[in-house]
Amino acid sequence: MVSVEAAFAVCALIAVLAMALGGISMVAAKVRCIDAAREAARLVARGEAGRATEAAQQMAPRNAQVSVQVAGDEVTVEVSSEAAGGLLPALTVRAEALAILEPGVGGAP
């Protein structure tokens, strides 16, 4: 009788640990997406658009999608990635960063 209760307790402990590790990996992926989007937006705003996507791909989690849009003098960068390295395909981590083009760069006055 005690061994059955112990087995249930161990299973519950493993489930809680797995959820905690999944949550931590999602937070880490979110931080990496935020950093990648912010850095890419800064690079585009400074006139280094060619390096922006490459830098974002290096900083973001593996297999992340990077989208850079320039509308007038506004730069919007969106980085999205599968949560937990693809282990949770139904969840996506996404971050967005905005910047204003510096004067003399692209379409900025």
Image (tube, rainbow, N blue to C red):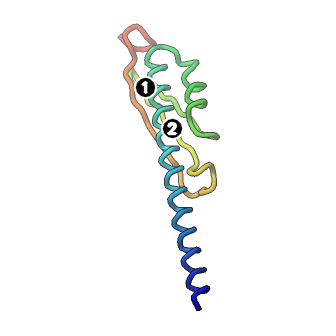
The residue located at (57%, 25%) in the rendering is 55
For marks 1 and 2, give the one nearer the viewer: 2
Q: Which of 108 and 34 is in front in this view?
A: 34
Q: Is mark 1 on a helix, strand or loop?
A: strand
Residue named by callout 1: 75
Residue 17 location in percent, x, y?
54, 63
Q: Relative to 77, is 101 above or below?
A: above
Res. 5 image quadrant: bottom right
Residue 62 location in percent, x, y?
63, 40
Q: Which of 105 and 14 is in front in this view?
A: 14
Residue named by callout 2: 32
Which disc is residue 31 wearing?
A: none
Q: Which of marks 1 and 2 is nearer the N terminus?
A: 2
Q: Nearer the viewer, residue 103 or 29?
A: 29
Quarter of the image that includes the C terminus: top left
Amino acid marked by disc 1: Val
Q: Relative to 24, is 105 above or below?
A: above
Distance from Cα at disc 1 to Cα at disc 2: 19 Å
Residue 14 location in percent, x, y?
57, 68
